[in-house]
Amino acid sequence: MWVKLCCLLLYFLALFVLARVFEAVAWYESGFLATQLVDPVALSFRKLRTILECRGLGHSGLPEKKDVRELVEKSGDLMEGELYSALKEEEASESVSSTNFSGEMHFYELVEDTKDGIWLVQVIANDRSPLVGKVHWEKMVKKVSRFGIRTGTFNCSSDPRYCKRRGWLKSTLIMSVPQTSTSKGKVMLKEYSGRRIEVEHIFKWITAHAASRIKTIYNSEHLKEEWNKSDQYRVKIYLFADLDQPPAFFSALSVKFTGRVEFIFVNVENWDNKSYMAEIGIYKTPSYILRTPEGIYRYGNNTGEFISLRAMDSFLRSLQPEVNDLFVLSLVLVNLMAWMDLFITQGATIKRFVVLISTLGTYNSLLIISWLPVLGFLQLPYLDSFYEYSLKLFRYSNTTTLASWVRADWMFYSSHPALFLSTYLGHGLLIDYFEKKRRRNNNTDEVNANNLEWLSSLWDWYTSYLFHPIASFQHFPFDSDWDEDPDLFLERLAFPDLWLHPLIPTDYIKNLPMWRFKCLGGAHSDEETLETFPDSESDSDSENKEVFSSDREASEDDELSTFHRCSEAERRCSVEPCPCASKRCRAEPGGRKARSYGSCSSTGDMEPDWSAWPPEMLRCTECVVCLENFTSGCLLMGLPCGHVFHQNCIVMWLAGGRHCCPVCRWASYKKKQPYTHPQPLSSDPPS
């Protein structure tokens, strides 16, 4: 995961550098930058009209170029980047889709239940022609879609009772606008009552209703009162301009950011005294001023801050984001990071796509699961201060010059998706090249594997996982019994319980306690010790030997190669025999006898050195796995239950899939309350 995250960060850095290269090339070829101001006098009438249409200002009654130029100057400064974007948008002949409503519920779900957008719906009455013809309607749809206004058509023939209940007896135009200035408020439906059906007149009607939601200030006293007022809105954006009404993009944004940002239009057309404007730092008009608790920010001074809907929408989203905006951003970043697996994974093509699908499913599932507690966390009422501090951090970070560059690059690459995808593919191919070179230097065989070889290895792994679930986690090879005797497969099918053994890694084995068996001294022959064993004990030993020898023989062939170092230690410790180790029980201070896994029958003068044993281990002198006595210097291993065995014997037992104690069947990977030796009560009893 960290590798993919680093690759994604390198890709974003490459995009940032590439954008600066494009700016340098554009400056070298044309001699201007995107942030350079444009003199409207040098522009043609068509370009000026295009700028007004993108800003949402009507120009139907302005036949002279001078009047159009003055209107452009009154609405805001024009930059080279805005001019380029406006001309590119005009040349693009993309057809904008319009919704066809099927009935009342469809209309209610999309129009009346939408609280943060504007809808323009053409209602076609029964047996009537539409109010706006097809050609004019297509122009209307394309014009209003620039400002985020959605369009649709409702044919009353699909639901005549709803049209009769609404009073739509003739064809008309319906506009839906949020009625209040609070988020998720009521929606108000307005019907077009004008006589002229031209596109410009209908657009003026739309912009007039949208601008009516914006608070308008006409004098300096009202401005002073509003500027010093403290209310629920933490972020306010002011437009100081000499216009009859604010541009359409400004009105559309006021609907989109309802409840988050307050939009205020200051009409300075007939102001004689502008002294208070100078007091608050406004020296020229038009000006777009953002006022936050942290201070005043002048929109339009940094890179990418154009007088357009798209640029200001990106700016306000970064300052005052919704939870949905953050979720969409995290979703995009996580999927971009997951797609890096297609290039990092080496080997067959099918393997790459299998790993990619697995990574996409895993990352998206984890993202959704991680967002659920975050959403619940944000609903808590006493976290308002945390929410305010988070927004304050967003405002501080996104009003910097670096943030303006990032927003400008985002708008550039989102308007050129082919360039974005090609750079992502090129970055991925570079990662694939360097990763393949690194693995070839490490002599990795998977680089040259083809699809058939990988599918074959995948099938081998799956069958190994299915038939030998424990062995799938081991690092040593094993020979399958199914190859020699296919009847074993049928026998296993007859016992479903054998398929359900838990998959337990063997990493815990290296953490089990190990020590060497030592004696205090003395000499007794093995024959003398064996004579002290009762007959009953020898019978039980023979039975145990039959049980455990069968298990040992089944796993010896596979495990001996991995744990050969334990066998060498066993051979070394058998050189010096310890007579005291042959006793089945020893006398402890206090007269009590240390328990072994068999029965006690003799005592001796010499004792094993119990000080070398971990305090939580039971004292014994015999390994019940191999049924042999401990010898001086041999390596021992204890289990959490307290029982002790030869290290070689118990490791082979555990690695063979039997993750439990051979004596008490306590799980070998599960902790147990440590054994405490009893305190001595009296002196040793007579023998």
Image (tube, helix red, strand yellow):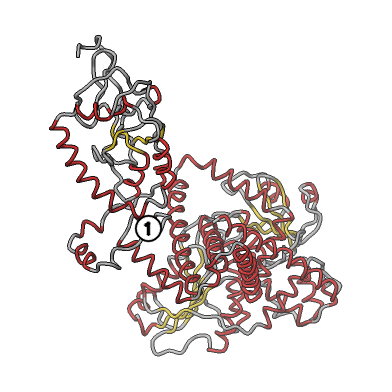
The amino acid marked with disc number 1 is Ser
Q: Would you say 337 lies left or right of 350 here?
A: right
Q: Where does the C terminus fall, quadrant-wise?
A: top left
Q: Is residue 215 visible?
A: no
Question: 269 or 360: nearer the eye?
Answer: 360
Seen in the picture, residue 94 relative to 421 is either above or below; the reply is: below
User: Residue 101: horizontal and vertical position, in percent?
Assistant: 41, 78
- Residue on which disc 1 sits: 472
What residue is at 45 percent from the left and 77 percent from the top? Answer: 452
Which of the 4 image quarters holds residue 229? top right
The residue drawn where x is 35% and y is 35% is 638
Q: Provide residue 215's location: percent of width, then percent of height.
A: 62, 57
Point 79% across, 74% down: residue: 69
Q: Is residue 109 visible?
A: yes
Q: Quadrant of residue 593?
A: top left
Outermost left residue? 536
The residue closer to the viewer here, 257 or 440, is 440
Q: Residue at x 16, y 37 (%)?
A: 540
Reply above or below: 419 against 228: below
Snapshot quadrant of residue 82: bottom right
Position of residue 125 in the picture relative to residue 420 (left or right): left
Dot 1 falls on a residue whose secondary structure is helix
Farthest residue to the top: give it: 683
> Badge 1: few (under 14), some or many (20 or more) residues near its Cα, within 10 Å?
some
Residue 311 in picture, x, y percent from top left: 67, 65
Q: Quadrant of the N terminus?
A: bottom right
Depth check, front residue: 222 or 375: 375
Image coordinates of residue 27 in percent, x first then y, are: 83, 71
**Number of marks present in the image shown:** 1
